[in-house]
């Protein structure tokens, strides 16, 4: 029991020393105006580089990823038809595809698939 306590104390001590050393090493040097400004090949920036991000583009990308993952789920269903009972496979496949179609219909009715508004 005493050895375990000594090992735990050594572990805590080593961890604390490492944390302190990492914090001391990672302190950044003094910054000045030149280091804080954006750098464009030696020239001063002419315009603001923060372009507004289209939230509609983000929604289209998220919908694409969701349907892409669903396609990845559907592909193994085709290969498992040989190894499963036909009725349970058919019910599972149809219910999954119905949920996909309902989701697509919902997105279509809410106007998420229209690129321009």
Image (tube, grey):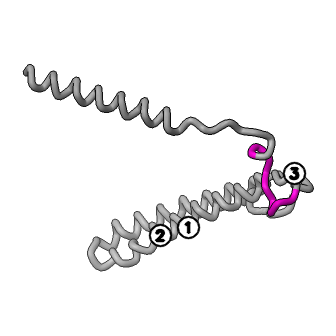
Residue found 54% across the figure and 59% down from its top? 99
Left or right of residue 102: residue 52: right
Judging depth in this view, the residue of 92 and 116 nearest the camera is 116
Residue found 63% across the figure and 64% down from its top? 64
The numbered dot on residue 72 is: 2
The numbered dot on residue 68 is: 1
Q: Pointers 3 and 1 in contact (CB under 8 A)?
A: no
Left or right of residue 61: residue 88: left
> Element at badge 2?
helix
Q: Choose the circle earlier in sequence order: 3 or 1.
A: 3
What residue is shown with label 3?
Answer: 48
> Element at badge 3?
loop
Q: Pointers 1 and 2 in contact (CB under 8 A)?
A: yes
Q: Quadrant of the C terminus?
A: bottom right
Q: State which quadrant residue 104 falls in.
A: bottom right
Q: Quadrant of the N terminus?
A: top left
Local crowd size for mark 1, using a 10 Å CA cut-off: few (<14), some (14–19), many (≥20): few
* 24 over 38 or under it: above or below: above
* 50 over 80 or under it: above or below: above
Inter-mark Cα distance, 3 to 2: 40 Å
Residue found 12% across the figure and 26% down from its top? 4
Q: Nearer the viewer, mark 3 or mark 1?
A: 3
Q: Choose the circle earlier in sequence order: 3 or 2.
A: 3
Which span of residues is magenta-colored?
35-43
Residue 36 magenta-highlighted: yes
Q: Main secondary structure of the magenta part?
A: loop
Judging depth in this view, the residue of 2 and 59 nearest the camera is 2
User: What percent of the width, then of the height, locates residue 45?
Assistant: 87, 55
Inter-mark Cα distance, 3 to 1: 35 Å
Judging depth in this view, the residue of 116 and 5 nearest the camera is 5
Local crowd size for mark 3, using a 10 Å CA cut-off: few (<14), some (14–19), many (≥20): few
């Amino acid at each position: 029991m005493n050895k375990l306590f000594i090992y735990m104390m050594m572990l805590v001590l080593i961890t604390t020393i490492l944390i302190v050393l990492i914090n001391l090493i990672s302190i950044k040097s003094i910054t000045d105006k030149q280091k804080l400004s954006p750098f464009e090949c030696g020239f001063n920036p002419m315009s603001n580089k923060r372009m507004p991000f289209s939230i509609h583009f983000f929604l289209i990308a998220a919908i694409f990823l969701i349907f892409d993952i669903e396609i990845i789920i559907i592909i193994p269903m085709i290969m498992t038809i040989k190894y499963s009972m036909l009725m349970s496979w058919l019910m599972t496949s149809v219910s999954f595809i119905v949920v996909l179609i309902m989701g697509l219909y919902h997105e279509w009715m809410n106007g998420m698939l229209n690129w321009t508004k």
